[in-house]
Image (cartoon, coloured by chain):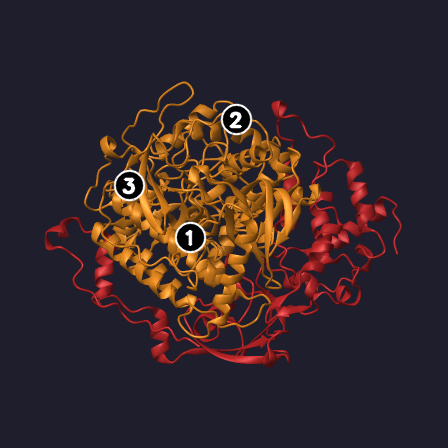
Chain colours: A orange, B red
Amino acid sequence: MYEHDVLVVGAGGAGLRAAIAAHEAGADTAIVSKLHPVRSHTGAAEGGINAALQEGDDWELHAYDTMKGSDYLADAPAVETLAQDAPEDTMRLEHWGMPFSREEDGRVSQRPFGGLSYPRTTYAGAETGHHLLHTMYEQVVKRGIQVYDEWYVMNLATTDEEDPNDRQCEGIVAYDVQTGTVEGFKANQGVILATGGPGQAFDHTTNAVSCTGDGHAMAYRAGAPLEDMEFIQFHPTSLPSTGVLISEGVRGEGGILYNNEGERFMFEYGYANNSGELASRDVVARAELDEVAEGRGVKDEYVHLDMRHLGEERILDRLENILHLAEDFEGVDGLVEPMPVKPGQHYAMGGIEVDENGQTCIDGLYAAGECACVSVHGGNRLGGNALPELIVFGKRAGAHAAGDDLGEPEIRTGYGDDVEDDDTELPVAPGASGLDSADSVAADGGVAAETGTLEQAVERERARVDRLMDKDSGVQHAEIRAKLQNAMTDYVNVFRNEEGIEKALEIIRECREEYQDVYVDDPSTTFNTDLQQTIETRNLIDVAETIALGALVRNEFRGAHWRQENQVRDDENWLKHTLVSWDDGEPSIFYRPVILEGEEKTYEPKVRSY
Amino acid sequence: MSTQQQEPESQESPQDPEMKGTESPQQRRLKEKEEGMVDEHAEEEAEAAGETVHIKVFRYDPEVADKQEPRFDDFHVPFEKGMTVLDAVMYARDEFDSSLTFRHSCRQAVCGSDAFFVNGSQMLGCKTQLSELEQPVRIEPLPHQEVVKDLVVDMDHFYDQMHAVEPYFQDEDTPAASDLEEQRQSPENREKIKMSSRCIWCGACMSSCNIAAGDNEYLGPAAINKAYKFAMDDRESEEIKEHRLRILEQEHGVWRCQTQFSCTEVCPKDIPLTEHIQELKREAVKKNLKFW
């Protein structure tokens, strides 16, 4: 048994920042991560950090752009917090030695990004995330914060009161990947989930293989609702073969999209007559797929992104990393030929419902970064807004968990008086979750009992590992995972309709049922990735289901969520967040109104044109 | 062993005729795929053509009886244009043997977890094209590091050396939140440290270094490069630079390097490691620090 004041699960941008903040606030803090911190997916972020740093720009403009970009589904208190804190937190990184790109006068450079009214994206080449991750890990090393790396967190230890709002998180149960030991970690003050995105629910994604929605699934099963999960961002420029990301920075610097006839289609076909390639990501992603569907795609699959005209010097200065990616993964020299690109799953706007201080409805349980939904991105995240989210809300979650007084949050969490129930008959039964039978290999335990919670949770997870290891025939996780990923990519992608989503839910249910029969072939307790991936696959099933359910009930077109049956934004009925919570092994849906009232003004929904 | 069949899903027509007008591009393509109008996946084509890649993968597990004696397993993986070494081992794991163990995550050469010893050289699995390698492709764990299992090596010593150079920015006093303005750095100075800042801690350089293999205390190319990044950054004071050089000129520091260039050769991020080490030697001489 290990014991700390604050436990941070995950060691990407949000986790490291949370740990630093908790440590600075005086808490004995430890990070538990399935990867060594420098392996985290934040390292793959390329573009930059939005922060109003220059004269002529201010946080209010940043907040306005973010509200508009979100298609008015972001909560204003969260957005204003982001915009207000981002400059200071970005400058803090500079003082920690982060190698930002520089102007002649030595100040940090900023560049334009899609959907921004001012060039406020601070960057370090086209490898901003790499530098941010390493800079923060350096600070963790400097402070001597304890890191348990290659420990896979399997579950939370929470009490079992009927109402999740009354529950308390006491710690976590983790599996030492190197030795196979299952141990409990007690958190005296709080557990912060910073486990990143759930991109592996999709087949074609820019996300790392490790992005399996572990934090989402653990919080969800413990009773914290998942919010706005239907809003999945598809990045318009990923490489067709692998899903590797080509930064929006390319378009920010002036890169142009062409179809197979050499037409600059963003203008030619009127997809975004003002902003062209720099329209919001959802607009560009749909335009690309439309081009391919109209027969104007290259090899009937992708479009071209051209940066040759920017000149070698500028490309090498600001986008050098992109040249390497295009060369290594597609065999294309970006200096002499255009790069092939197509939309790929990129980011989950939704996540674990939290307030501005990172708190979920469960006492002592926090979430920050991509796994959380504050919500600052609403229906669509603007490029350059993910990294400030990590540092701003990572820091706040860490500080709050460690006892800093950040004031009363304006955003409410959990089921309460201000929510609206959903009376939709769900067309597809969720399928056996494995919760009702303790003997099932699919059993994940759910919430623990009131007394001796952590010890009980440890025993339960040990039993779960034993069951998975003892079974010697059945289905392997890779088969279920592939089936799930294909279903999501086929039916819950950029374009969606009711029939397709229902089809996806049916397949997800099949995956659940097959999972009852899953087994781990590798008998070893040393670095058993087979076992780890089997548990991750269970998490992906739960998360994929919430994405599909959200997409099914939200019958409107907002941000990244396009619905064939209703291709208009329906402000009258849908200025509200979708929440999915896990009640007795079944998902249930409710809604909470979006908060458009900011500190001094109300953000009136307008048509989102670019 | 499970063999996953790629059966085309049997489907009833997914489209309501009156919805045709608003059919999305993705649905149209999906329908075409379901009706077999779109070319089958290139992988299946390759499979049909019988084109496979022969990989020989190092296997070892201290716990499993038949893997306690290290051996090589042969896999024949269907070849697809653009396929990398990592793609091949992932295919072998997912389709043939789920116990095959290796680290990997981002598959875009930035997380640094999948450095392997491929056909006798250190490289990242994810950025190495199979088509460029001679067959059979021999895939082994990084040499000079203890093997935990299959392709997974113990990285603790590597991390210890990285930490030994005080790998964090050391400014005199961090300003208060209220007057937080950036430190100035010239674009030239930023350019000077740029290459050194690209290190992804994959360990390829350390594994390729003969000196590190013979001297366990040698800081090694990665850690020295990390120190170079800070030492050459004008934002840190001269005093701190001197402190850094003192760490580097110790007995098992920069002077151990015999400029064999193997680290520079294998670095997947093209960092001129040997050059950086030489430059630090020159700096140490300039500062009149002793050398061994």
Residue B232 is at least partly visible in this image: no
| Residue at mark 3 | A267
| Residue at mark 1 | A199
Q: Say which label, 2 or 3, has the lower sequence index.
A: 2
Residue A90 tag number: none
Q: What distance separates the C-alpha of mark 3 from that of mark 1?
A: 31 Å
| Residue at mark 2 | A54
Mark 2–mark 3 CB contact (< 8 Å):
no
Going by the image, does A158 lie left or right of B210?
left
Q: Disc 1 residue type?
A: Gly
The residue positioned 65% from the left and 39% from the top of the image is A97
Q: What distance separates the C-alpha of mark 2 from that of mark 3?
A: 31 Å
Same chain? Circles 2 and 1: yes
Residue B42 found in image quarter: bottom left
Which quadrant does the C terminus of chain B fall into? Answer: bottom right
The residue positioned 13% from the left and 51% from the top of the image is B19
